[in-house]
Image (cartoon, coloured by chain):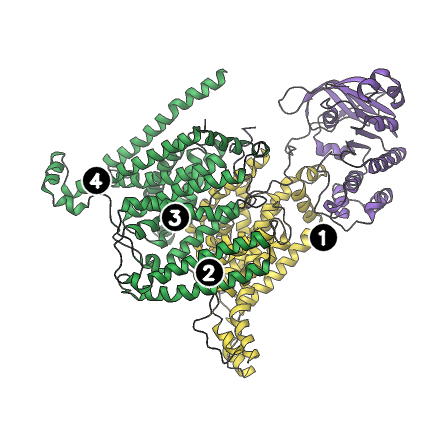
Chain colours: A purple, B yellow, C green
């Protein structure tokens, strides 16, 4: 990190000169490469044989494959440090893949940067910092639709229909909402681009069980509406209950793959990940 | 008790000067707070940016005057303002490209940008000195007064006079227009909302398709415009001297922090709070008190502090606000 | 670990080489006369002496910034406050000033401090804003009641020559310590307020206190005659005139081939240089010892990972306050030394660009966190600051030589001395860009 910050931690405590809130981590200057052809018989979205890590660091993913079909929910589960979030970020273009490819809807998008993947149809909800806290709920949704130049009112209404609780607070600053409602705003923001696939990084982290159930209900509703959902989940049991397809990752590699029900029935998976 | 005369004295010596000064501080503080919110550092070069912009305005004003162009009762500087804004915007954009962008791309800690802004401050200070020198200039022309003391006395029949200088009125009118335009821009337009979004959460803004470089360019242009306008109004109202623009950095920073760094509304409130306190604390109240309490003969001037200590006032307000409300009056991003 | 060894070997030679280059520059300044250098040892030593004082100042800033990451932009204030000490300590007492209002003045200051202390006490006990306001207003009235007549009396005392309270007539060297003490007290007060909040507001607070201290010195005539300046502050070294009248010295100078006038100037400057070097080396020694002590290790641990240090039960704010006070004291010492070197106190000369931000350029160019770096940066930058004022016009003269005479050429020649600001800014920006850890990086 010394190259990034030659002064170490000096001065970063002094709020009268520096503002560290909301600083970015994604390199926005990386340019996209060309979009290639997809392969016949591909699932709707597939990250295939992905190997890579952050920056010049060691590989975190090893030959990892994740895919999701239309109208389905796919979940990525696994122990802490298994590379679940990393796998999702790899699909979203936030780390360097040394091998493997990402293909969406008949196109090879491996060379695209995250911004352009959003334009290609990916809706991504980060685990934290996934809203604009000082902006109102409505403005959050508007910002979600920033790349659209058509009329967004209909989409916004759909989001409000999906999340009636936040619809009531559309003029309130998103940062003032409860944790569950913030997650709803975050998901709603991602939906505003009318994505072809929705990717959620631990959407239920830090929310109460009741809120979690409600959020899962909404996610199921989204998937049944035809929008494929790819989700990383800490709560493996609940996640597998709603999953059409589940991936258990261990140390950055696929350990078990199957439908939620299959994996729940698998003794080894139950023993190691579901606590018996 | 003579409330009317007391009021006239108060308006003449406290309210009007403080309102004009407050508007100038508010415009300066808005620039500082925007850069703090978007570029995430306190720009020590802001005072010198103001000085540079004003210097260009003065040079263009002289050029226009020598060509015989004037705005009638309004100062010619208003006509020169767009040139000053354009030159200053070009300068800060070039500075950003040459200096700040490098660190932004590297995601360097904001403190390095603060240091870099000190370097930029030196360079801009030198540029301004090269451009116009270190002397003091007055460059207001056109009508000096909207209300002058004699007319007011004749009209009202009061012994106390009231003067409203045209530069003071102009300051307030321009400030209101600029602030209204800025708030409309930030709250109603897509680009303005993109700026706020970027300030809130850079990564999410990027993922929403907002072009960070465009947001940064916009911010610099707005900050340069605000700085040039604030500097020109300040110079019209008082006079132009490059060093004074460096000194005004303290009340401007104080205003921005008191209001809550990163909050445009706070910058305006902070600007007026600092200005009114400065004027009120350093004004000799003996005359006002004399009218309100005719029998009372205070020994001194009833001046809390000498005018030399006006900087102390912004400082004390700053400390008091921070002690009781660490995030500033309008909850900035500072904590 | 070949990498580490390489970088260590690199830096082992780096410092001596850079210091040697700097020394050569000063020798050139002293011996070669051309458009670049003056060829006068008097000029060379004058630059060096002020460079050494800048080095001490930079050392103080480097303690705050390098050890603890504190951003002090009120250096000018602490320097000015330190500069007050020689006046109050070493000037002879002013006749009748104390009788005129001395005791009343002291009472006023005591009331002022007492009121603040009571207010603080009441606030911690009751948290009542109303009570505080009442105490402060009553205190302010009492303070002004005592203070104003005292000041008027003192300032009325022989105003053309004095009008100030005068000094204590003690040795001027003692005032250097007192200058440090003054700055330390101010730093304690300001640090107590600005460092204890939820996050720091030290930069803006120091910016403010710097302005205020300078404003006080400009306007409080009773203290140091304000803008009327104080002259003839006693010296710790010999006077040129005495040396020139001393036959032994004249003979000694001639044996070296110098005129008595020139030699006396050089002698005085060398004496100052020796004094300054002793102070500088003692301070560096203390700073290095402190840095290697458990206290220094803790300071660095806090700076590198505040959260971890806090979790281990270290009182970060308290440590920061300590180092802020120590650094400010060093700056105060430098301020006292500056006034002693000049022999006069001119409050109007305390310009933040020169006395705060130029010091920062020195620290960053030298190397944040490295004491020797601060010294190197300070002397180098000071040399440049002085010489660019000469080189700038020479350069512009060269560039405009071909231009026809006219207002533009005149303007360019006139404004050429301002080039030093641009030059200093560019030096800082280039160092930040290409060697952000400075000429001598911290190990």
Q: How far, Cα to Cα, is label 3 from label 4?
A: 32 Å
Instruction: Quickly name the residue at label 4.
Output: C266
> What percent of the width, then of the height, locates residue C347?
36, 54
Mark 1 is surrounded, within 10 Å at the Cα level, by few (under 14), some (14 to 19) or many (20 or more) other residues, namely few
| Residue C342, visible in the rendered structure | yes
- Above or below for C227 versus A262: below
The residue at the point 41 percent across, 41 percent down is: C359
Q: Are marks 2 and 3 on the same chain?
A: no
Q: Quadrant of residue C387?
A: top left
Q: Are marks 2 and 3 in contact (CB under 8 Å)?
A: no
Q: Are marks 3 and 4 in contact (CB under 8 Å)?
A: no
Residue C182 got which mark?
A: 3
> What percent of the width, then of the height, locates residue C279?
32, 37
- Above or below for A69 versus C72: above
Q: Secondary structure at mark 3?
A: helix
| Residue B74, visible in the rendered structure | no
- Above or below for B295 versus A239: below
Residue B62 got which mark?
A: 2
Residue B188 got which mark?
A: 1
Q: Chain of mark 1?
A: B
* Lower position in the chain sequence, tag 1 or tag 2: 2
Q: Looking at the image, is mark 3 or mark 4 nearer the viewer?
A: 3
Q: Secondary structure at mark 4?
A: helix
Left or right: where does residue B222 sit relative to residue A251? left
């Amino acid at each position: 990190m010394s190259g990034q910050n030659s002064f170490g931690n000096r001065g970063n405590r002094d709020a009268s000169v520096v503002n560290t809130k909301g600083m970015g981590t994604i390199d926005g200057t990386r340019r996209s490469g060309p979009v290639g052809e997809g392969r016949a018989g591909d699932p709707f979205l597939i990250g295939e044989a992905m190997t890579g890590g952050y920056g010049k660091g060691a590989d975190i993913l090893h030959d990892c494959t994740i895919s999701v079909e239309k109208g389905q929910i796919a979940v990525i589960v696994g122990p802490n440090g298994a590379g679940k979030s990393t796998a999702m970020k790899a699909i979203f273009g936030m780390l360097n893949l040394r091998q493997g490819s990402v293909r969406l809807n008949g196109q090879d998008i491996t060379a695209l940067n995250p911004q352009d993947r959003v334009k290609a149809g990916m809706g991504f909800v980060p685990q934290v910092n996934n809203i604009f806290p000082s902006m109102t709920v409505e403005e959050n949704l508007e910002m979600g639709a920033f790349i659209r130049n058509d009329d967004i009112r209909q989409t916004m209404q759909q989001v409000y229909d999906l999340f009636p609780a936040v619809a009531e607070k559309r003029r309130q600053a998103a940062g003032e909402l409860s944790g569950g409602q913030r997650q709803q705003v975050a998901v709603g923001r991602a939906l505003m681009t009318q994505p072809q696939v929705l990717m959620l990084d631990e959407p239920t982290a830090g929310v109460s069980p009741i809120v979690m159930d409600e959020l899962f209900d909404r996610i199921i509703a989204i998937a049944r509406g035809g929008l494929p959902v790819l989700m990383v989940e800490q709560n493996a049991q609940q996640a597998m209950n709603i999953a059409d397809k589940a991936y258990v990752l261990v140390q950055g590699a696929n350990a078990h793959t199957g439908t939620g029900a299959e994996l729940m029935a698998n003794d080894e998976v139950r023993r190691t990940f579901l606590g018996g | 008790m003579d409330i009317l005369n007391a009021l006239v004295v108060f308006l003449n010596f406290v309210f009007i000067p403080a309102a004009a000064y407050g508007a100038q501080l508010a415009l300066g503080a808005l620039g500082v707070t925007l850069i703090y919110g978007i570029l995430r550092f306190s720009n020590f070069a802001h005072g010198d940016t103001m000085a540079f912009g004003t210097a260009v305005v003065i040079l263009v004003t002289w050029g226009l005057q020598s060509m015989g162009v004037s705005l009638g009762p309004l100062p010619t500087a208003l006509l020169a303002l767009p040139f000053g804004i354009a030159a200053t915007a070009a300068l800060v954009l070039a500075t950003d490209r040459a200096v700040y962008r490098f660190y932004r791309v590297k995601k360097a800690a904001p403190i390095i940008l603060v240091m870099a802004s000190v370097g930029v401050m030196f360079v801009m200070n030198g540029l301004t000195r090269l451009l116009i020198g270190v002397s003091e200039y007055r460059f207001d022309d056109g009508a000096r007064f909207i209300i002058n003391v004699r007319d007011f006395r004749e009209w009202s029949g009061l012994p106390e006079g009231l003067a409203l200088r045209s530069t003071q009125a102009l300051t307030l009118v321009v400030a209101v227009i600029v602030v209204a335009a800025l708030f409309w821009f930030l709250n109603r337009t897509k680009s303005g909302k993109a700026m706020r979004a970027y300030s809130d959460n850079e990564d999410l803004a990027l993922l929403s398709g907002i072009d960070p470089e465009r947001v940064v360019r916009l911010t610099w242009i707005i900050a340069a415009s605000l700085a040039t306008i604030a500097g020109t109004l300040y110079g019209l109202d008082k006079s132009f001297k490059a060093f004074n623009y460096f000194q005004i950095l303290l009340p401007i920073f104080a205003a921005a922090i008191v209001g809550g760094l990163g909050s445009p509304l706070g910058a305006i409130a902070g600007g007026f709070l600092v200005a009114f306190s400065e004027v009120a604390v350093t004004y000799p109240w003996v005359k006002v008190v004399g009218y309100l309490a005719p029998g009372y003969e205070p020994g001194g001037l009833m001046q809390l502090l000498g005018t030399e200590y006006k900087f102390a006032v912004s400082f004390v307000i700053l400390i008091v606000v921070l002690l009781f409300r660490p995030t500033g009056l309008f909850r900035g991003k500072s904590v | 670990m070949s990498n580490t060894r390489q970088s260590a070997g690199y830096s082992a030679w780096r410092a001596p080489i850079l210091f040697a280059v700097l020394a050569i520059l000063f020798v050139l300044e002293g011996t070669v006369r051309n458009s670049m250098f003056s060829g006068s040892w008097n000029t060379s030593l004058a630059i060096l002496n002020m460079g050494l004082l800048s080095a001490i100042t930079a050392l103080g800033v480097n303690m705050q910034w390098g050890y603890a990451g504190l951003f002090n932009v009120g250096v000018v204030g602490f320097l000015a406050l330190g500069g007050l000490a020689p006046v109050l300590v070493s000037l002879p007492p002013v006749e009748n000033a104390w009788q005129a209002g001395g005791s009343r003045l002291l009472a006023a200051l005591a009331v002022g401090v007492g009121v603040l202390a009571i207010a603080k006490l009441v606030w911690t006990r009751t948290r009542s804003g109303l009570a505080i306001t009442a105490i402060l207003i009553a205190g302010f009235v009492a303070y002004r009641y005592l203070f104003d007549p005292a000041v008027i009396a003192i300032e009325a005392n022989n105003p053309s020559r004095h009008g100030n309270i005068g000094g204590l007539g003690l040795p001027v060297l003692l005032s250097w310590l007192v200058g440090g003490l003054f700055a330390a007290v101010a730093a304690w007060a300001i640090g107590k307020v600005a460092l204890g909040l939820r996050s720091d507001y030290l930069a803006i607070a120091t910016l403010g206190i710097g302005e205020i201290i300078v404003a006080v010195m400009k306007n409080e005539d009773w203290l140091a005659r304000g803008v009327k300046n104080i002259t003839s502050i006693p010296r710790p070294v010999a006077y040129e005139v005495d040396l020139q009248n001393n036959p032994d010295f004249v003979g000694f100078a001639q044996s070296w081939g110098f005129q008595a006038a020139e030699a006396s100037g050089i002698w005085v400057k060398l004496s100052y240089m020796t004094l300054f070097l002793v102070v500088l080396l003692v301070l560096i020694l203390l700073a290095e010892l402190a840095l290697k002590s458990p206290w220094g290790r803790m300071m660095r641990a806090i700076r590198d990972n505040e959260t971890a240090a806090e979790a281990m039960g270290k009182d970060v704010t308290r440590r920061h306050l300590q180092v802020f006070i120590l650094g400010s004291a060093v700056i105060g010492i430098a301020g006292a030394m500056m006034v002693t070197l000049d022999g006069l106190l001119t409050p109007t000369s305390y310009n933040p660009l020169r006395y705060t931000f130029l010091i920062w350029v020195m620290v960053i160019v030298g190397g944040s966190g490295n004491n020797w770096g601060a010294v190197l940066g300070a002397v180098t930058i000071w040399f440049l600051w002085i010489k660019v004022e000469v080189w700038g016009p020479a350069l512009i003269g060269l560039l405009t030589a071909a231009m026809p005479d006219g207002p533009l050429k005149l303007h360019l020649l006139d404004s050429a001395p301002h080039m030093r600001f641009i030059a200093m800014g560019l030096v800082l920006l280039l160092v930040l860009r290409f060697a952000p850890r400075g000429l001598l990086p911290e190990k």
